Image (cartoon, rainbow, N blue to C red):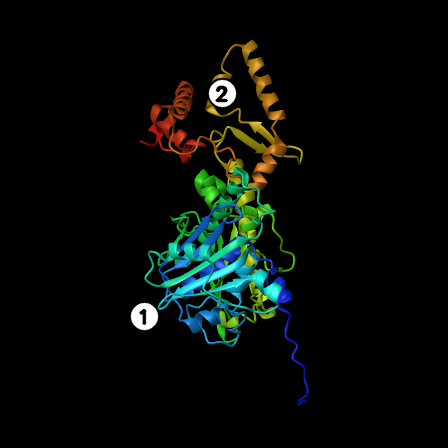
Amino acid sequence: MPDRFDIAAPDPAGMVASLSSLGYSLEAAVADLVDNSVSAKATKIDVAFTWDGEGSWVAVTDNGTGMSLPELITAMTPAARGLGAERTAEDLGRFGLGLKTASFSQARQLSVSSRAAGEEWHTRTWDLDLVEATRQWRLLHDADAETTRILDLLRRDLDGGTVVLWRRLNGYGAEETDADQTTQQQFYDDANRVERHLGMVFARFLKDVDLRVQGQPVPAWDPFMTGHPSLQRLPPEDLAFGGSSVRVEAYVLPSAQKLSKDDYNAAGGPRGWLRQQGFYVYRRRRLILVGDWLGLPGMRQEEKFNLARIAIEVPAELDAEWSVDVRKSKVVPPVGLRRHLKRIAQRAREQSADVIRHRGQIAARRHGSVFVYPWRVDRPDGRIKCRINRDHPLVMEVLRTDAERRKVLKALLTLLEETVPVEALRVMHEADAADDPIPFGGDPSQHEEAVARAVQAALINQGRSPAEAKAMIRDMDPFSRLRGFWSE
């Protein structure tokens, strides 16, 4: 092996620029800090956003195991722990870059203060302006007076653990910050976005970890609605690969018609229904990829697949095979698993499309009793026609009038049939929106009871007994989905 060589050390200024430009979003960067807190076995983690114009700051505080001074210096050194470093089962890291790259992407100053059991607090600071000016990796001892004041405030109620503080935030410098209410609102809107993201990424930890943003507990977000009775679960599969097992569980969520407005909005998640469909990849219980079809051939996001969501549990030892990136936000499935993943995805997508397009109602309307539905769907000449059911007892009762008035009512019915808002219905039907019209729905109100009473009176007028009339109403849409006097 040649023994002549040059030391080609990277320029600190160029390296800082590179590490700061890895494409972290704010929420992904904060999540990387929370990873470290979880790995340190913290049971309480606080994320704080404090507005002060160009002096605004963000901090993540935990009560975990903390670090000794040598451990802190290692944690602050870029890539000090590489891929081959031994990690515990709770360690969510991979490259040893997360703390630095996440922080450098959001702030020009990073201070970390930590205290392990039986030790004092140790603090180290990166000032990127100083690194670029001196072209040296000068890791500063302690911090300036204002940073120390903030650290003291954050450590006040901690016996041990770690505080990570970002100051001189990107986008909030003296020339960039307009210290008005709009900018301040944007700052706190960012905090709200971070909260929603953390609730999604760390949902599986929140039973054991008290995670808070701005002092408020972060609610866990379950993308699969596992507690809902109308959820469809496909059989789970354990796919063998690389000496390990990759567990895949596919779900088809309930349609909007079976969800309350609040449940529908919550199930849409932080990114909305369209961008939440697809695979959810977990690594050590931490969500690392949210709603993506993994680049599988022929699979793209479409409204009709909104209900299809699939969980994948990837063992950490398969990081390399899945090409987990530095930000833990992108994966590429191994070639040997792609056909199985595509097969599972196709089945979930087909069931999602079936639920959204059909909802099991059109067939029932075609084959049900003549009195059940106020509308009929026919194909008299190969084209779909929506017709008001003239055999419905309420329609029959209305038409029992003098010839002149009956003529006007029939004209009205024909007008309604010929002006069905097909385009608007198609849009609602395909998107399956939460605000789709639902016939009555829920417990019957006085208005709905009055309609049922009118139907009962019409049936009795047409020769049915009261008991027969109630039995017929029980089979009618939408009363078959409600409880009322006809259910007694």
Which image quadrant is residue 142 in? bottom left
Residue 222 visible in image: no
Instruction: Please name the residue shown 51% across and 33% down the image.
Output: 437
Which image quadrant is residue 428 in? top right
The residue that label 1 is drawn on is 118
Residues at marks 2 and 1 touching, judged by CB atoms closer than 8 Å: no
Is residue 120 shown left or right of residue 48?
Answer: left
Q: Viewer-proximal residue, 125 or 413?
A: 125
Question: How many circles with numbers are drawn on the protein?
Answer: 2
| Amino acid bearing label 1 | Gly
Q: CA distance from mark 2 to mark 1?
A: 86 Å
Is residue 187 shown left or right of residue 426?
Answer: left
Is residue 115 shown left or right of residue 76?
Answer: left
Instruction: Please name the residue shown 52% across and 71% down the image.
Output: 318
Q: Viewer-proximal residue, 315 or 425?
A: 315
| Residue count near mark 2 (Cα–Cα under 10 Å), binned few <14, some 14–19, many ≥20 | some
Q: Viewer-proximal residue, 6 or 387?
A: 6
The vertical placement of 160 against 52, above or below, is: below
Element type at mark 2:
helix
